Image: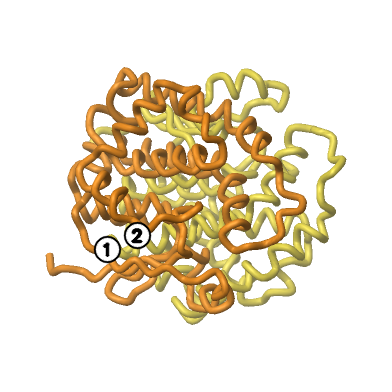
Chain colours: A orange, B yellow
Amino acid sequence: MASRHYKLVYWDARGRAESIRWLFAYAGQDWEDVRLPAGQLGRACAQAPLGGVPYLEVDRRPLGDVAAICRHLAHQFGLGLTGKDAWQAAQMDSVVEFIHETARPLYAWIDRRILGKPAQGDPAPEVLISNVAAPVRQLEGILLKNSGGDRFLMGREPSWTDFVLGSFLENLQTVDTDFLEMRPVLEAYFARVCGLKGVAHWLERRPPTAY
Amino acid sequence: MASRHYKLVYWDARGRAESIRWLFAYAGQDWEDVRLPAGQLGRACAQAPLGGVPYLEVDRRPLGDVAAICRHLAHQFGLGLTGKDAWQAAQMDSVVEFIHETARPLYAWIDRRILGKPAQGDPAPEVLISNVAAPVRQLEGILLKNSGGDRFLMGREPSWTDFVLGSFLENLQTVDTDFLEMRPVLEAYFARVCGLKGVAHWLERRPPTAY
C-alpha cells in the first residue's frame, strides 16, 4: 500500500481528538497534527466535513467523526486493532458507541473551555463525574470480564477501543484529579495503555494543553 | 456461511429499531422480531447488553447499539451495502453518526411516548422539527451531491445509510405530518427507499404502531 498523507485538524487541545493521536502513535504512523487557534471556529466549521472537528484528511479527502476516523485507521493499520473477526469488530463498535455516549456531556463541557465560551449553565465538575460513575463501572466490568482486569478492554491485546477509553479516562482525570486513584483497576489499566510503545513516546512529546 | 439465527429485541414500536428491520427486509433475511410490552422496561434493561434496547442476538450472542448492529449486518449481507471500498465504508460511518446525532432529541422524545412516561419538560414537536431543519438540509445536500438527488444517499445504489435516514425521516413525518411535503427532494427519496424490494413488503406486513 502506498504511503498515505494524514492530516488531523482540531483545536490546540487533547479533547475529542486525542484518541486518534494515540492510535497514530501506537501504529508508528506519521500524521500532520494541525491545531487551530480557538478564534478560528468559523473557518474550521466552514471547512470541516459533516460533524465538525476533529476531522481527518487522507490524501486531502476529508472524513468526519471520531469513531468513523478511528475505525477506519484501525482497519488500515491492521495490528489486530479491530479484533480477530467481524463479530469482535462489531462488539468493539458497540463499546465505543457506549463510551462516546457516556463521554458526551464531558466533551461538551471541555469544548466550551477549549473555545473560551462562557460556562454559565454548565454542570459542575462534581455533577459530570457523578453522572459517569455507573457507566464507568460497566466499562470496568467489561475489562474484568474480557481480560481479568489486567490486560486490555476487549482481551489480551490492545484494540482501538483502548485509545478511546484511555483518552476518555485522561479527560475525566483532568476534571477530577482523584478519579483514577479511587478506581485502582482502571488506574492500572490507564497506566498500561499509556505505557504502550508509541503511546508512551507521544505522551512525552505532545504539546502540553489544559484540556 | 451457515444460516444464522437473528433475534431483534425492542418495544412494540418502530422507533430506533426500524432501520434494522428495513435492513433485514431488504436483504430478504428472516429475523425473530421480539416486541416487549412497555411495562417490561426493567427486565429488558437487565437482559440487554451495553446500550440497552434495541439489541440483536445472533445465535444467542447479544450485540448492542443500532449503528453497530446495522454496520455488522450490512457487512454480513454484502449486496454492496457498505460501498465499494474501505473509504466509502468510512464515509458511511460518518454520515450515520451525523444522522444519529441529529436524531437524538427526536428519539428521546419518542422513547418517552413509547414507554408511556410523562412528557413534562419535553420540547414541543415544533421545536424538535425546527432544530433538525439545518442538519436535514445538510443531509439533503449529501444526497444531491452523491446522486443528483434522484437515487440514494451515498450514490446510485442503496447502502445501509438509506435505512438509517429513511427510518429517521419516517419518524420525523410521524411528529410533523407536513415534514416531507415541504421537502420534495427528500419526499421523493423517502418514497424510493420505501419502494425498495423487501422494504415495500415489510411496510405492508409490519404491525401498525403509533411510533
- Using the image, determine if residue A68 lies above or below residue A89: below
Residue at 55%, 69% (x, y): give it: A38
Q: Which mark is residue B85?
A: 1
* Residue A95: x %, y % from top left: 43, 37
Secondary structure of the residue carrying numbered label 1: loop
Q: Give left or right: position of A206 versus A157.
A: right
Along the viewing direction, whichever of B176 and A195 lies nearer the viewer: A195
Along the viewing direction, whichever of A89 and B35 lies nearer the viewer: A89
Residue at 36%, 33% (x, y): give it: A190
* Residue A54: x %, y % from top left: 45, 62
Residue at 66%, 39% (x, y): give it: B13
Residue A15 can be seen in this image: yes
| Total number of numbered discs in the rendering | 2
Secondary structure of the residue carrying numbered label 2: helix
The residue under label 2 is which amino acid type? Ala
Can you identify the residue that label 2 sits on? Answer: B89
Q: Give left or right: position of B207 versus A171.
A: right
* Residue A32: x %, y % from top left: 30, 68
Q: Which mark is residue A139?
A: none
